[in-house]
Amino acid sequence: MPLQECEKLYSKIFPFWDKLNREDQELLCLHTSDAKYAKGENIHGSNRECTGGILVRKGSIRIYLLSEEGKEVTISRLYSGDTCMLGASCVLKSITFDVFMDATEDTECYIIDGPALAAVNKHSVYAENYALNIVVSRFSDVMWIMQQILFLSFDRRLAIFLHDEMSRTGSTTIHMTHDQIAKYMGSAREVVSRMLKYFAAEGIVEHSRGGIKIIDKKRLQALALNQ
């Protein structure tokens, strides 16, 4: 990435940028590259040991765990402006589990080369602390997902998912298939379909051509909050 463009970007994104020496700033810029991924394309986890740091410019990325039986559990999603270090196992040795990342729509990213990121972290406690904080925030997502799976009923989990999507997109129509929702929730499509059918019968949602339309936001919120 051109140095001037890189400095302008990283001075806004990285709170530690001004604390780096000039050599480390140039190292990060020199080893930052543009990457484009088509919808559905794998970004990390498919025989790629260390992708590096990922900064999402445009689009979205799904981060998930994959069992030996092929079951997927989504642990987090990234959108424009988000940063992720879970693909940098060569940088943070505490990342000892495999995560997968797929583009959920056409996506553009900046990729920071893993070895360059590791070198800067070695020189700067501020950079290392930032990377660790990013990872901790993703672990918080993991714990929330595990808590839902282990302790919440599926109707409440689905209500939380639909309500979060409605809040994030600002739309009452969730543009997802039952299969996509199942992957995000770590469940089976049949279970999602059965519960959505129940929600429809209760007048909470209805099936539309574009996906799932929420028609009773108050009841959905009440169910999500277990009220």
Image (tube, rainbow, N blue to C red):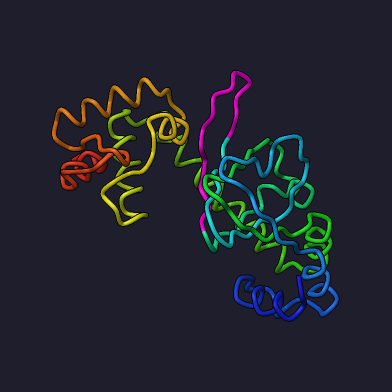
Q: Based on the displayed image, in which of its 4 quarters is residue 55 positioned? A: bottom right
Residue 89 percent coordinates (x, y) = 74, 46
Is 182 situated left or right of 137 in this image?
left
Q: Nearer the viewer, residue 208 or 33?
A: 208
Q: Main secondary structure of the magenta part?
A: strand
Residue at image point 68% right, 35% down:
98
Q: Is residue 62 above or below residue 79?
A: above
The quarter in which the C terminus is drawn is top left
Task: Indicate the position of residue 37 as horizontal and vertical percent values.
Answer: 63, 49
| Total numbered labels placed on residues in the image | 0
**Residue at the limit of the structure toward the front, as seen here:** 209
Q: Is residue 76 magenta?
A: yes
210 or 31, which lies in front? Answer: 210
Horizontal arrangement in the rendering, residue 204 relative to residue 37 (left or right): left
Displayed quadrant of residue 148: top left
Find the magenta span and give its range. 65-79
Residue at 33% of width from left, 44% of height from top? 174
Residue drawn where x is 66% and y is 56% of the image:
54
User: x%, y% of residue 52?
Assistant: 74, 53
Instruction: Note whether 106 is above or below 199 in the view shown.
Output: below
Q: Nearer the viewer, residue 80 or 138?
A: 80
Return the x and y of residue 130 as percentages of the image width and height.
65, 63
Along the line of sight, the residue nearer the viewer: 139 or 213: 213
